[in-house]
Amino acid sequence: MEVKSMLKRVDDMRGEIEKRRPLTDEEAEQLRAFYRVDLTYTSNAIEGNSLTLTETKVLLEDGLTVSGKPIKDCYEAEGHAEAFDYMLAAAKEMDLTITEDIICTLHRLFFKRLDEKQAGIYRPGQVIITGTEYVPPSAEEVPELMIRFVKRLNEQMATMHPVLLAAYAHRKLVDIHPFGDGNGRTARLLMNLILINKGYQIVSIPPILRPDYINTLKIAQRADNPSSEPFNELIVNCEIEAQKDFCRMFHNRNEPGSGIRTY
């Protein structure tokens, strides 16, 4: 299915979901708690974190560390959850403007338990990404690239479809790779900040899709004939799945494009 057709389905489903809103305070809190754990688990798992979904839930909701797991993995989960809370608060802004400060704060909250001195600070040197031929810009280029990135991102707020805008924000931040570590998780938080602000569902990329996720980023970053289309298609598909999850959780029977379903 072409991305254009997929986006129509996304918007049709969004319209049905809007009919279910506003959620009650209890429903909204349950949804927040669900995604706080789920996004923390999936985003960390993509980067090699060893905590399971259940272990992530126990750590974040009960405050219990997991025996036998690296303390670094626990710090990553706690930091991501804190950054998630900030993301939700920032997403409530009616006229959202993405700033470097927002991006750096997302990174700082996630990374401060791992390396407080580097948290929220642009990298001082070159980074090499294993498993890919892509070489990120030099450290000297990062500040100017970030200024241009944020400017371009805000310019496209009113013209680009929100899901494609969110995918673009993710992809370009990873391209610039402004931080020494934690760029992928910061990019996924930024992507979801835009999605939530525009009334769409939080996108979690499950670990099983890690090979597709990495491969589509490589296609977008390759020197010869780069293309963002596969990555965009992946993110739109994940948004559709997130919308289906919402419908299942709140018993929406009408799912546009799929007829009547019973959950």
Image (cartoon, rainbow, N blue to C red):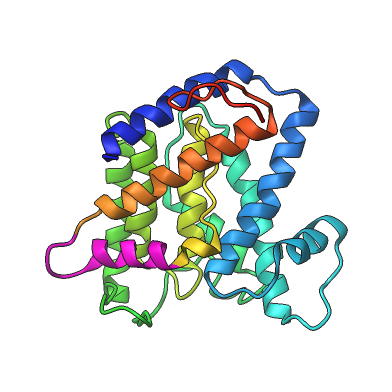
User: Against 64, is 195 above or below?
Assistant: above
For the C terminus, the image quarter is top right
Residue 162 location in percent, x, y? 38, 35
Query: What residue sits 50% from the left and 33% below the top?
Result: 200
Q: Is residue 54 left or right of residue 129?
A: right
Query: What residue sits 12% from the left and 63% below the top?
Result: 225
Residue 216 among those drawn in magenta: yes
Total numbered labels placed on residues in the image: 0
Query: What residue sits 18% from the left and 61% below the top?
Result: 226
Residue 1 location in percent, x, y? 29, 40
Q: Is residue 33 left or right of residue 200?
A: right
User: Against 11, is 171 above or below?
Assistant: below
Front in this rendered view, residue 107 or 32: 32
**As drawn, which residue projects farthest toward the left?**
224
Front in this rendered view, residue 179 or 193: 193
Main SS, magenta residues: helix
Which range of residues does the magenta coloring cover?
A: 211-226
**As drawn, which residue projects farthest toward the top?**
19
Residue 251 location in percent, x, y? 68, 26
Residue 68 visible in the current orientation:
yes
Q: Is residue 89 left or right of residue 169?
A: right
